[in-house]
Image (cartoon, rainbow, N blue to C red):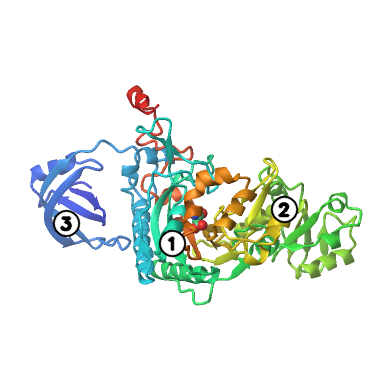
């Protein structure tokens, strides 16, 4: 600005404006200031003065520093993107230069939030008498439903360590060891196929307690969740979190992670729709729908968009039936030739719909139709602005099935993991109807995201052995893989249970960001690579030879 130079000087705590005024500043100093480029490291001395034009949007916007001495400590190349809140750098570029990206305030703020969360987690759990215990990283495979990362052993050629998918067996062994209340903020590793927003290494708040039942775990960790909401988001949840069984979650929301920030529950309408000559419906196993309030004015185009949406391959519905209950009492639908106005008014009653509402109905095989309805419900919630990022709706989902049948391999898999206890009432069903056995397992869900999950464990070696055999492990295989655990259970193992929370996801939720990459200092990209340090990468011949 003519004879005045301003420079923003930035550190971890923010920005302050330096000023050089040719009228009062020495010419060499002004010349030196002209040399400074973006991201130079400088030291300035001067007096703090009141600004003539104040910037109310900046915490330091009322002052500036009139510089009397300046040192350039280090130069900088021109950074590949601008270090500002709204940057011009694409994600790959920002990941390659992550150390520059972290200079941006929003990224730094997320890391600060993450740190404060770890502190509050530790404070709360310490207050509840938990102790943090570190467990090893070079271990033997633990089944958590993903592939293990393995590390070849140089000293034992041909043998491998596995990196923990979670410290599951160790925390159970700590209970057998009498430690009673354990937690750990711990890195876990899962070699999964690339899916949106997964990281091969991520952090859990991993917890375990002895002499507990499901309610004790739910109450203790609801306390943790409330503490975090209170201290970090200034939100007080006074009422208990709602609890929903897995079956009800599927029936009313079509998913085991319902977003209950808004109502719009799914209702089944199979019996009213079938038998009127409408082919798709007559052949369907299940017909269900949702009622969108005040949407009867939806245009042809909007309904077409919704039809396209449900027909996407990942959602998989064949089509969408819409029924409008107009404000003036008229009922409009695309299926008038199969259903009388009277029929449609019965539908209206079933959904408790009012004039002005819109019914959206899908038909097909039960489980896939429920899951398509879940996606449609979320889409409508989004369109209607009902999924406010600043609103939080936590709930517990309980009573998961113990087992899941896999068509492809024709065997049962543990829905949670093989150490989860069946509900004692259902133990007789293990031999007759394993698919109907419920587990003492629970998830914490917030805004449609699974934030944590856990279970009461099996603590009896015979029952554990039986569980392994249902999962298709021979006695020998079970002995080889988990002999140490079943053996430990023979030495006075207390009843125990626990839970683990996806810490990255929880921080992302509190930070209001969509991707967990935004709350991890040095994340991998969607292909599992760190493009800054260039890994995975090849290793030298010598290293390879030593290992194999
Ligand atoms: N180990 C489990 C998991 O990582 C959590 C638990 O059962 O505590 O999902």
- Residue that appears at 63% across and 66% down: 424
Q: Secondary structure at mark 3?
A: strand
Q: Percent position (x, y) of residue 291?
A: 72, 64
> Which numbered disc flags the more N-terminal residue, 2 or 1?
1
Alpha carbon separation for disc pair 1 and 3: 59 Å
Label at residue 367: 2
In the rendered structure, find residue 323 and report the number of the disc placed on it. none
Instruction: Give the quadrant of the C terminus.
Output: top left
First in sequence: mark 1 vs mark 3: 3
Q: CA distance from mark 2 to mark 3?
A: 66 Å
399 versus 485 height, above or below: below
Residue depth check, mark 1 versus mark 3: number of the one nearer the observer? 1
Q: CA distance from mark 2 to mark 1?
A: 38 Å
Q: Position of residue 221 (x, y in %)?
A: 47, 67
Q: Quadrant of residue 208?
A: bottom left
Dot 1 lies on which element? helix
x and y percentages locating residue 160 in the rendered image: 43, 36
In this image, 324 relative to 101: left or right? right
Count residues near mark 3 (Cα–Cα under 10 Å), then give few for <14, some for 14-19, many for 20+: many
Marking on residue 175: 1
Query: Which residue is at the front of the view, 391 or 427?
Result: 427
């Amino acid at each position: 600005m003519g004879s005045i130079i301003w420079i923003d000087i930035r550190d971890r705590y923010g920005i302050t404006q330096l000023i050089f005024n040719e009228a009062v500043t020495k010419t060499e100093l002004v010349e030196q200031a002209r040399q400074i480029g973006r991201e130079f490291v400088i030291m300035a001395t001067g007096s703090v003065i009141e600004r003539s034009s104040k910037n109310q949007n900046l915490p330091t916007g009322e002052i500036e520093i009139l510089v009397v001495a300046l040192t350039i400590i280090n130069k900088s190349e021109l950074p590949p993107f601008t270090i500002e809140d709204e940057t011009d750098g694409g994600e790959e570029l920002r990941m390659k230069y992550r150390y520059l990206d972290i200079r941006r305030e929003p990224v730094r703020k997320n890391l600060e939030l993450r740190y404060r969360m770890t502190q509050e987690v530790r404070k709360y759990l310490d207050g509840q008498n938990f102790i943090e215990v570190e467990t090893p990283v070079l271990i033997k495979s633990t089944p958590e439903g993903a592939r293990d990362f393995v590390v070849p052993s140089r000293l034992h050629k041909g043998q491998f360590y596995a990196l923990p998918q979670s410290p599951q067996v160790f925390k159970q062994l700590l209970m057998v060891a009498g430690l009673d209340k354990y937690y750990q903020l711990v890195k876990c590793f899962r070699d999964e196929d690339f899916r949106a927003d997964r990281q091969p290494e991520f952090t859990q708040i991993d917890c375990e307690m002895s002499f507990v039942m499901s309610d004790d775990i739910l109450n203790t960790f609801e306390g943790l969740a409330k503490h975090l909401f209170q201290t970090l988001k200034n939100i007080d949840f006074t009422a208990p979190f709602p609890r929903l069984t897995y079956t009800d979650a599927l029936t009313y929301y079509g998913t085991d992670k319902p977003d209950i920030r808004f109502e719009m529950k799914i209702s089944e309408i199979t019996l009213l729709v079938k038998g009127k000559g409408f082919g798709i419906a007559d052949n369907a196993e299940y017909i269900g729908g949702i009622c969108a309030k005040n949407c009867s004015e939806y245009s042809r185009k909007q309904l077409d968009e919704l039809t396209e949406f449900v027909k996407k391959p990942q959602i998989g519905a064949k089509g969408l039936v819409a029924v409008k209950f107009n404000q003036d009492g008229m009922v409009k639908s695309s299926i008038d030739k199969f259903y009388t106005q009277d029929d449609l008014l019965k539908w209206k009653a079933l959904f408790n719909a009012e004039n002005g509402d819109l019914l959206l109905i899908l038909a097909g095989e039960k489980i896939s139709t429920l899951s398509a309805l879940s996606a449609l419900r979320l889409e409508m919630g989004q369109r209607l602005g009902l999924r406010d990022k600043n609103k939080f709706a936590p709930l517990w989902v309980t009573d998961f099935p113990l087992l899941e049948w896999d068509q492809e391999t024709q065997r049962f898999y543990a829905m949670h993991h093989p150490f989860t206890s069946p509900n004692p009432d259902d133990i007789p069903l293990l031999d007759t109807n394993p698919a109907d056995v419920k587990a003492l397992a629970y998830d914490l869900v917030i805004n449609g995201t699974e934030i944590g999950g856990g279970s009461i464990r099996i603590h009896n070696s015979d029952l554990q052995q039986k569980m392994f055999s249902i999962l298709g492990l021979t006695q020998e295989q079970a002995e080889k893989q988990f002999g140490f655990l079943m053996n430990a259970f023979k030495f006075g193992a207390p009843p125990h249970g626990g839970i683990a929370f996806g810490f990255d996801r929880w921080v992302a939720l509190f930070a209001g960001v969509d991707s967990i990459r935004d709350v991890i200092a040095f994340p991998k990209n969607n292909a599992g690579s760190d493009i800054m340090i260039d890994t995975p990468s090849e290793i030298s011949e010598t290293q390879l030879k030593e290992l194999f």
